[in-house]
Amino acid sequence: MGAMTVMETTSTTRTDSCAGPRQVDRRPDGQDKYTISEVVAFTGLTAHTLRWYERIGLMPHIDRSHTGQRRYSNRDLDWLDLVGKLRLTGMPVADMVRYAELVREGDHTYGDRFELLKATREDVLSRIAELQDTLAVLDRKINFYADAGRALASERS
């Protein structure tokens, strides 16, 4: 497969439901050749990060213009959206690169991709539970200080 994308092409085209919402300022497919600076504006990533993603195999080979400038497609933007979501999960870069390699290898890797994403989901659920516990502690402290503040205010009046 030439370009690693969230939309994986086999004998039938399937759209991965992890693809982010289409951005309104994207060009129609076929006219979707974005410069690195446009992708920086779309994603908030730096050009350095985009080039690094490509170097480590997290991004596919990016098409080039006749002058050698990178030209990204809508599918590349979809992939970057997924990578952003995976980063938010806390997935290690090595696992993201492994996932990218599995996508490039084709449909026979569905089981491995499933296991990798399932393990990541378990990690996310564990982090959510930790954050909920942390939130409960903060709520107790906030309530304590709110009550203490009311008590001090009523003492003064």
Image: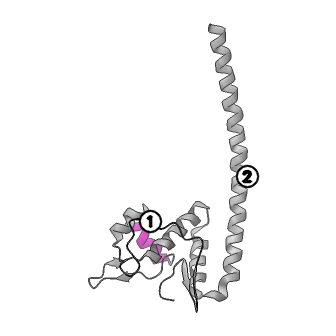
Residue that lies at the very extreme toward the bottom in this rendered image = 11
At 57% from the left and 90% from the top, the residue drawn is 10
Label number found at residue 23: 1
* Element carrying mark 1: loop
Position in image of residue 15 (x %, y %) = 57, 78
Q: Position of residue 48 (x, y in %)?
A: 39, 67
Report if residue 94 lies within the magenta region. Answer: no
Mark earlier in primary sequence (2, 1): 1
Q: Is residue 68 left or right of residue 111?
A: left
* Amino acid under disc 2: Ala
Magenta extent: 48-56
Disc 2: which residue: 129
Element on which disc 2 rests: helix
- Measuring from the top left, give residue 69's x and y in whole percent: 31, 78
Query: Which of the two residues, 107 or 89, is positioned nearer the viewer here?
Result: 107
Q: Nearer the viewer, mark 2 or mark 1?
A: 1
Which residue is pictured at 72% across the width and 58% down the height? 125
Q: Quadrant of the C terminus?
A: top right
Q: Is residue 47 above or below residue 6?
A: above
Q: Is residue 157 left or right of residue 76?
A: right
Residue 51 is one of the magenta-drawn residues: yes
